[in-house]
Image (spheres, grey):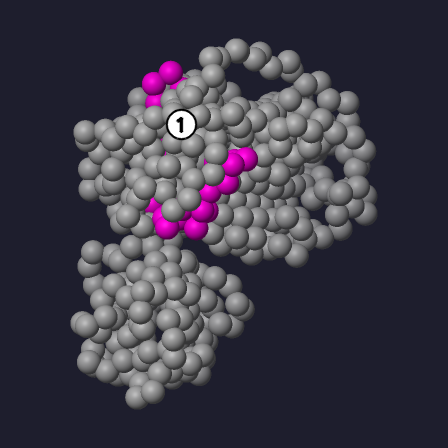
């Protein structure tokens, strides 16, 4: 990135000396299941929803090792679990734990190749000190009511590439809520981003959080070619004393509303490389170049409404500098698929001050400019996006009359058997993995598929991906056969790829629905 570095005015962060906790910590089974308070909002409600570990066992952890142990003690990598965290989590009490249901590391909190997990701070609070949280190849994750501070990529100790919370590689449905993410400087001081998403990360919401004292707020996409990310919501967050990237968007769609931005030193929302941002009812204060395309000639786009610009300065346009102001106007339109209530921009500073960050009582706003106490978690949560839906899909099965092919087929089976409506016939791959596709002569809109196993093979299919064969985009990923939902997509060919199984899968029907 080519840019001039502005003088930073980093606030001194108070550091409290805490007694060291034993490395083994505590993993205490709780008598009753609990869940993170409230329900997911924004794009995390799409693609089947985000419920974390709702319905699973609840354990208490006071060290990073205990968090990893809780993940590794599950029956499988998708068994729901709620991990209640209290105390200071750091390098001294975090070690790698091994198991069939986890893939952990010693230098970070590793949420890798797993699903259906809630990580929530309780009691006197949870502080991840110089230790980042890493989400990779995972889905249906909730991180709530925690502080992550001073995570470094250079110097000592290092963790998570310098990101407070980082997500990468086929991540789906994550809700990060009521967190405090902070650093003590920029890249030259050893820090990187506070909230980074890359390499096919989708359906994420960051809400009611504080991001402060950092050179970089966060990004969506690690380079101009990493445009497979998107469907990200940012609402009721406070960005304070940040140089840039609030966020940086490369491709994809973001909904940015009711945030309070204070002291953005160099630039703010940086929409580039074809990204589209809907920017509603935010309050920008004492800042520079709060919206536009910066440090590149690869244009991005925005739709603006209801924002307040209070003492905001704007640079002159240039070949790699296209600020949206001084009179920001929309240059695209963005359709939002979920319902939401907007607070008036004029009250955003007070509402966000009363609600955002860890240990604020998880209060929220309902659009009335008045903080509300949190509602209990739903007692009958929506299933996780990777689990079969409880009911059959409605409408016409578009697979009937379509064509089919695949990567391999076992002797005596046929691709066409997945389209014939007969549950006794099936396709199997030649081994434990393989793919089968449904294809049409013209573009067809699909948002739901139903993978039916034969009666004698139920539960054989393990991990899978649903792929838009036209573009190669991953529409959904998870484990176990059944009903799978994703954003409605127009395509000519859709592929169900089995990447893991406990035997030889037998797919009786590959149903598709609009």
Q: Position of residue 85 (x, y in %)?
A: 37, 27
In the image, which residues are magenta? 100-126
Judge the density around disc 1: few (<14), some (14-19), many (≥20) Cα neighbours within 10 Å.
some
Q: Position of residue 458 (x, y in %)?
A: 22, 67
Q: Is residue 506 visible?
A: yes
Quarter-of-image position of residue 61: top left
Above or below: residue 171 compared with residue 93: below
Q: Residue at x 23, y 70 (%)?
A: 457
Residue position for label 1: 24
Closer to the camera in the image, 213 or 407: 407
Quarter-of-image position of residue 111: top left
Disc 1 secondary structure class: loop
Closer to the camera in the image, 57 or 207: 57
Q: Is residue 485 left or right of residue 394?
A: right
Q: Residue at x 39, y 42 (%)?
A: 141
Q: Position of residue 147 (x, y in %)?
A: 48, 24
Above or below: residue 313 compared with residue 478: above
Quadrant occupied by the N terminus? top right
Q: Position of residue 122 (x, y in %)?
A: 35, 23
Magenta region includes residue 110: yes
Quadrant occupied by the C terminus? bottom left
Q: Is residue 461 visible?
A: no
């Amino acid at each position: 990135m080519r840019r001039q570095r502005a003088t930073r005015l980093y606030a001194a962060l108070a550091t409290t000396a805490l007694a060291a906790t034993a490395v083994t910590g505590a993993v205490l089974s709780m008598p009753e299941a609990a869940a993170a308070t409230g329900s997911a909002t924004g794009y995390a409600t799409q693609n089947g929803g985000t419920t974390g570990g709702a319905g699973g066992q609840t354990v208490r952890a006071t060290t990073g090792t205990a968090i990893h142990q809780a993940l590794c003690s599950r029956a499988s990598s998708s068994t729901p679990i709620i991990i209640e965290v209290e105390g200071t989590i750091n390098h001294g009490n975090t070690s790698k734990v091994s198991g069939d249901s986890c893939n952990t590391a010693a230098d970070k909190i590793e949420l890798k190749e797993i699903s259906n997990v809630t990580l929530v701070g309780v009691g006197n609070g949870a502080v991840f000190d110089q230790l980042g949280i890493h989400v990779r190849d995972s889905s249906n994750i909730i991180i709530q009511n925690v502080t992550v501070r001073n995570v470094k990529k250079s110097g000592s100790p290092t963790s998570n590439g310098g990101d407070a919370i980082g997500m990468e590689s086929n991540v789906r449905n994550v809700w990060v809520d009521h967190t405090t993410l902070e650093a003590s400087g920029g890249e030259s001081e050893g820090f990187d981003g506070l909230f980074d998403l890359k390499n096919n990360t989708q359906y994420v919401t960051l809400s009611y959080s504080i991001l402060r004292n950092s050179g970089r707020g966060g990004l969506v996409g690690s380079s101009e070619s990493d445009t497979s990310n998107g469907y990200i919501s940012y609402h009721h967050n406070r960005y304070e004393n940040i140089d840039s990237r609030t966020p940086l968007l490369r491709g994809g769609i973001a909904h940015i509303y009711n945030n309070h931005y204070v002291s953005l030193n160099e630039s703010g929302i940086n929409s580039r490389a074809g990204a589209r941002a809907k920017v509603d009812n935010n309050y920008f204060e004492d800042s520079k170049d709060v919206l536009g395309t910066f440090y590149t000639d690869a244009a991005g786009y925005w739709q603006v409404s209801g924002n307040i610009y209070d003492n905001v300065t704007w640079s002159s346009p240039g070949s790699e500098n296209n600020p949206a102001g001084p009179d920001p106007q929309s240059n695209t339109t963005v359709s939002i698929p979920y319902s939401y209530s907007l607070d008036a921009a004029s009250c955003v500073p007070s509402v966000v001050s009363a609600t955002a960050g860890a240990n604020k009582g998880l209060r929220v706003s309902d659009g009335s400019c008045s903080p509300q106490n949190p509602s209990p978690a739903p007692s009958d949560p929506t299933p996780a996006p990777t689990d079969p839906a409880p009911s059959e899909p409605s409408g016409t099965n578009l697979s009937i009359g379509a064509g089919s092919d695949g990567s391999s087929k076992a002797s005596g089976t046929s691709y066409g058997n997945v389209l014939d409506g007969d549950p006794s016939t099936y396709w199997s791959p030649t081994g434990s993995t393989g793919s089968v596709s449904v294809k049409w002569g013209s573009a067809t809109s699909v948002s739901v598929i139903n993978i039916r196993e034969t009666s004698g093979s139920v539960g054989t299919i393990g991990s899978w991906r649903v792929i838009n064969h036209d573009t190669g985009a991953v529409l959904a990923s998870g484990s176990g056969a059944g009903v799978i939902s994703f954003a409605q997509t127009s395509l000519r060919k859709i592929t169900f790829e089995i990447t893991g199984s406990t035997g030889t899968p037998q797919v009786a029907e590959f149903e598709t629905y609009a």
